Image (cartoon, rainbow, N blue to C red):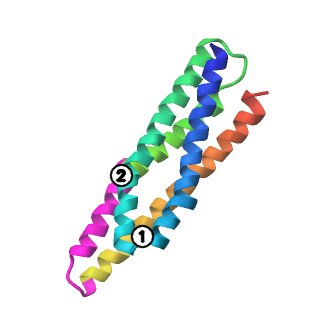
Amino acid sequence: MSALFRYVLLLAVVVWIGGIVFFSFIASPSVFKLLPRELAGQVVGDIFPKYHLLGYVSCVLALGCLLGLHRLGTTRSLRTAAVIIALMGTVQLTMGAVIGPQVTAARDAAKAAPAGSEQERLQKKFRSLHAGSMIFNLVLLILGLVFIYHLAVRLLM
């Protein structure tokens, strides 16, 4: 059973981090390169709920496996791993449930506003929120890479 928990833990984290890397560095840049900006935004906007769902499911699986390993009495310390995964889940949830809707609302408000200073203010707000979202995504990726390092050094040896 320990091997199954370790396998699912590793699979969940690899899929989660792989999804972040693929979306951030391959899919999103390609979509914005090939499609008109507004259409590209719609495509990426359609992907985001699935992107966040992937993170939520991966987080629950990873935490469940860590709990299972703990209950099996593994001799390895799982506290650091659980803290990193919980932080990742918090960042993912914040991105999906808080920041994402704010970015969408700001984008839609800027598009709906008449040309002028109000539209410029709303576009600036959108760009600021979007930059924050990108920073959160980068933090999520870094935490994932730290977790994989921790996994390689501590849990799999």
Quadrant occupied by the N terminus: top right
Q: For mark 2, does the 10 Å Cα neighbourhood hold few (<14), some (14 to 19), or many (20 or more) residues?
A: few
- Which residue is disc 1 drawn over? 128
Q: For mark 1, does the 10 Å Cα neighbourhood hold few (<14), some (14 to 19), or many (20 or more) residues?
A: some
Secondary element at image label 1: helix
Do the numbered discs 2 and 1 sit on residues whose CB atoms are within 8 Å? Answer: no
Quadrant occupied by the C terminus: top right
Give the answer, above or below, for where 85 lies relative to 23.
above
Task: Give the x, y percent position of residue 135.
Answer: 52, 60
- Which residue is disc 2 drawn over? 98
Residue 104 is inside the magenta segment: yes
Task: Give the x, y percent position of residue 14.
Answer: 61, 39
Task: Give the x, y percent position of residue 88.
Answer: 53, 42
Q: Residue at 51% across / 29% down in the picture?
A: 61
Q: Looking at the image, can residue 139 be seen? A: no
Q: Which of marks 2 and 1 is nearer the N terminus?
A: 2
Residue 64 is inside the magenta segment: no
Main secondary-structure element of the magenta-colored stretch: helix
Task: Give the x, y percent position of residue 80.
Answer: 65, 33
Give the extent of the magenta segment. Answer: 97-117
Secondary element at image label 2: helix
Q: Which amino acid does label 1 sit on?
A: Ser
Q: Residue at 48% across / 31% down in the picture?
A: 60
Q: Which of 34 and 54 is in front in this view?
A: 34
Residue 13 as seen in the image, left or right of residue 101: right
